[in-house]
Amino acid sequence: MTEDTKKVPEHVAIIMDGNGRWAKKRGLPRTAGHTAGAKNVEKVCRAAWELGIKYVTFYAFSTENWKRSEEEVGKLMQLFREYLVGYLSKIAKDNIKVSFIGNLSVLSDDLKEKIANMEESSKDNTGLHMILAINYGSRDEIVRAVNRINERAAQSGESPVRVTEQMISDNLDTAGIPDPDLMIRTSGELRLSNYLMWQLSYSEFYFTDTAWPDFDTNELKKAVDAYVNRDRRYGKA
Ligand code: FPP
């Protein structure tokens, strides 16, 4: 193992899966699982910072999640609203910087305004950088990045443009944020579900059967311990 692999991950990306199953097991509606899941975000942020993690990206709503029932989508949007208002007051105390990724343009105007407020009011905070993925899909993000590159090139009369990896990275929603070192998916599913496909190219993956609302400090420590013992070779022998 090299010194580098013994380090705590700088950036952890999380797929918060299993809210629905968590609720069903308790005889509750699926939406109760999302409420419990939203509460857990705050706890995991605190635990992550204590462990020395600098960035955490949460998959809160995918471009495919619009296919869920109107009731469930409405509840999730309501949770984002409540969360954005409720957490805003605590963010200064916790020194958390919040950013959003995903195609936010289709969200309701009030939600967009709350998102902009939260980003603006936390932009100079120096603690944990929390990134929330809302209406996020990796394929959609890459397509938007390529279109942005093309539009800029066309504006400067430089068409067709020779696209480089760096240009794509610089035009993704995550521009300026280091790629995740560790990706955690809770609740037993072993797939990526259109999450950060470009950024996770060299990340370590950790899967646990624990449902997201039960994923506590101890579970995060287990994931970080597993990461610390991995040998990251980045294609080297
Ligand atoms: C996946 O579980 C979870 C989601 C699609 C939503 C995640 C959202 C939250 C945890 C709450 C909102 C977060 C913030 C920051 C306010 P699932 O519903 O697919 O669970 P299942 O696979 O058991 O049905």
Image: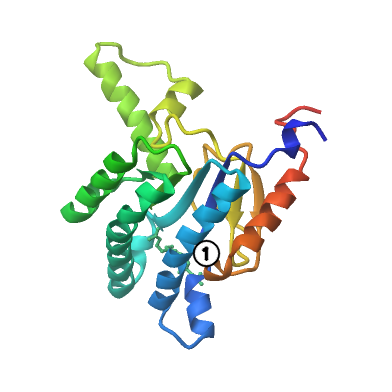
For the point 37% across and 16% down, the residue is 161
| Residue 163 falls left or right of residue 107 | right
Colouring rule applied to residues? rainbow
Instruction: Please give the residue where the numbered disc 1 appears in the rendered image.
Output: 17
Q: Residue at x 40, y 55 (%)?
A: 62
Q: SS of the residue at dot 1?
A: loop
View extreme (bottom): residue: 27
Q: Position of residue 105 (x, y in %)?
A: 24, 46
Quarter of the picture containing the C terminus is: top right
The image position of residue 87, as x and y in percent, is 34, 57
Ligand 1 occupies quarter: bottom left
Q: In this picture, is 38 found above or below 62?
A: below
Would you say 216 lies left or right of 40 here? right
Would you say residue 195 is visible in this rendering? no
The spot of residue 14 in percent (x, y) is: 53, 53
Q: Amino acid at mark 1?
A: Asp
